[in-house]
Image: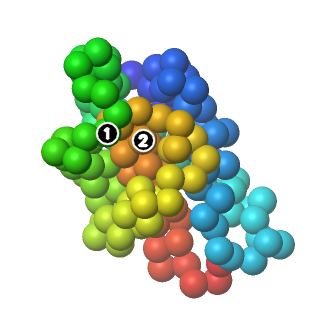
Amino acid sequence: MNAEEIIGKLEGYGVTLESMLETAMELYLGDDEKRENVKERLKRIMLHYLNDVNVQALLSAALLLEERFEAEVEGDPVNLVADELIGIDIAEYIGGKMGLFNFFYYDTRKPGILAKLPPFLDDAVGGFIAGCMTRLFEGDQSE
């Protein structure tokens, strides 16, 4: 599988590379003059991790769980935590422990596409975005 294939599967739920970039940038707090440069660097990071077999496996798991539970689970019940665990795993895999904190930031605010996604995908995509944003700024204090 490659980045295009996993994006193709996500597109079935309205998730595109551009929508993930826009969602990530909604919570960007840096200098507006650097915004386009940040977005371009983030795109490269996202494409890199969309080609990672572990990220693909976790995103695919979220997609399969969405299909499996679509008819059985309504909304995002409080006792459902598997969705959070997938998001946390993706965020930490990409961004380390700081990715975990960034995941909760995106998860509580639900910017952009995250507000429109069902439970497993909002957390998986949110974890992906959070991990990539963390990776982008890790060790780079100039942004």
Instruction: Name the residue that disc number 2 marks.
Output: 122
Image position of 17 with respect to 136: above or below: above
Element type at marker 2? helix
Residue 97: image x %, image y %?
28, 70
Q: On the picture, is 77 further left or further right than 141?
A: left
Amino acid identity at mark 2: Asp
Position in image of residue 49 (x %, y %): 43, 44
Q: Is residue 50 above or below residue 112?
A: above
Q: Residue at x 65, y 58 (%)?
A: 25
Camera-side residue: 12 or 134?
12
Q: Amino acid at mark 1?
A: Asp
Does any portion of residue 6 appear in the rendered image? yes
Can you tell which mark lies on residue 76? 1
Tell me which residue sits at (19%, 41%) in the image.
80
Which residue is at the far right?
33
Q: Which of 36 and 61 lies nearest the eye of the viewer?
A: 61
* Residue 108, x across and y down, in percent: 43, 60
Q: Residues within 10 Å of mark 1 (few under 14, many from 20)?
A: few
Task: Tell me: residue 112, above or below residue 109.
Answer: above
Could you tell me which residue is drawn at 31 percent across and 20 percent down?
70
The quadrant the N terminus occupies is top left
Residue 108 is left or right of residue 68, and the answer is right
Q: Earlier in the sequence, mark 1 or mark 2?
A: 1
Indicate the position of residue 15 as horizontal and vertical percent values.
Answer: 55, 31
Residue at horizontal 44 percent and vertical 66 percent from the top: 105
**Secondary structure of residue under mark 1:** loop
